[in-house]
Amino acid sequence: MIKLLSPSAAPPDADTQAPVWSIVPTEQGGRLVLEGTWTVPKGGVPTFDAQALKGLKSGQNLLVDANGVSEWDSALISFLWDVEQATTTAGLTFDVSILPDPTQRLLALLPPTPPAAAPSQFVRQNLFTRTGEATLNALEETGVLTEMMAQSTLGALRAITAKSFMRGKDLLNDIWRAGPNALLIVGVVNFLLGAILAFVGLVELRRFAAEIYVTDLVGIACAREISAIMTAIIMAGRTGGAYAARISTMLGNEEIDALQVFGIPISSYILLPSIISLSIMMPLLYLYGTLIGIFGGFVVSMSMMDVSPTGYWISTFNGVELKEFVFGFIKSFFFAGFIALAACRVGLKAGRSAADVGVAATRAVVIGIVGIIAMDAVFAVLANALGI
């Protein structure tokens, strides 16, 4: 903070005096007299009334006298800038020749008038333009994902012959994170879903004295739809979000750029272990989740049905055919590939700031869940057409 003392120094109590200003007429025009403490904490920024310049004629001089200012900061500069704009509008000369040098230098940094507002860059496009852009973007993303899938497939083939840049350590780490680490949450969710299906089915089937068919209900629902979808949704939120966050963090830390400089293909070094690990573990997690879901239905049925445990399992094995497990197994494999590809693509498209990491993770989860539901609908149509 810079302190200015007038030639006739005021007593210390004057330092807390509120900022005041006045215009005194002179032969050359007028003198703007400033007094008091011109600081933001003590007095704020006073308002200059341009009507005070009406007594002055165009071409005259307005001299600024700050000898009565005891203390000042940016509040004084802001006030003087307002005065300068008002004098320019009134056709007066703004004279700051007797102000201290620091004040004059700060005022010289400001433009005489506020800069004009930049015109809005927003252009409203018509429906056809927006539809065309959305279509082109969708086709571009489809092409990029197809290229990533092709590169990953070639990388997997090269990995078999030990000619890939993929490290075995990275693959094992991703397999561990995508498989054994997810057993608990996959098991809990599928167990509860199987129990819910059994409870709801028993309540409804009891009306028709057909409680035994709850075994078919739980077994077919878990093997064909529920376990595959729920396991995929869990992995999209757990593993897919982690993939996107990890790759976007590497992008922000310029690790991706470093790999490209050294000529190391990203598809083999980073994407391939993630895609292979999830594609291997997702079908296995589906089988695990299906068995746990059927067991959850068994636990609830034993507490509500008058049937032996052996009879329940025999009815389940007779009612659920092997093709139901095969169908769910194939779906889970495609779900895994989609989740991994989408998460990696979102991570590579993310920005380089810390906030973009969270945005990429959220976007990967949303895209993964929506894509899983859409793919399951396609599989349902195909199964109906093929009679599966």
Image (tube, helix red, strand yellow):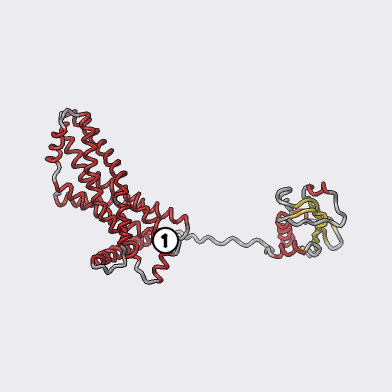
Q: Which of the two residues, 290 or 76, is positioned nearer the viewer here?
A: 290
Return the x and y of residue 47 as percentages of the image width and height: 72, 51
Residue in front for this viewpoint, 49 or 331: 331
Instruction: Indicate the secondary structure of the residue bearing disc 1.
Output: helix
Nearer to me, 376 or 85: 376
Instruction: Please give left or right for residue 280 compared with residue 78 in the image.
Output: left
Total marks placed: 1
Task: Report the amino acid beneath label 1.
Answer: Met
x, y percentage for residue 224?
A: 20, 46
**Residue at (73, 58) in percent of width and height:** 80
Residue 293 lies, in percent from the top left, at 24, 40
Q: Considering only vertical position in the picture, is 182 above or below 212?
A: below
**Residue at x-position 14% and y-position 49%:** 387
- For residue 70, side relative to residue 217 (left or right): right
Residue 136 occupies which quadrant of the picture? bottom left
Quadrant assignment, res 156: bottom left
Q: Give the quadrant of residue 133.
A: bottom left
**Which quarter of the figure is the N terminus placed in?**
bottom right
Which residue position is annotated with label 1? 250
State left or right for residue 210 relative to residue 63.
left
Q: How crowded is the residue under tag 1: few (<14 C-alpha within 10 Å), some, or many (20+)? A: some
Percent position of residue 249, x then y: 43, 58
Residue 32 vertical position relative to residue 59 in the rendered view, above or below: above
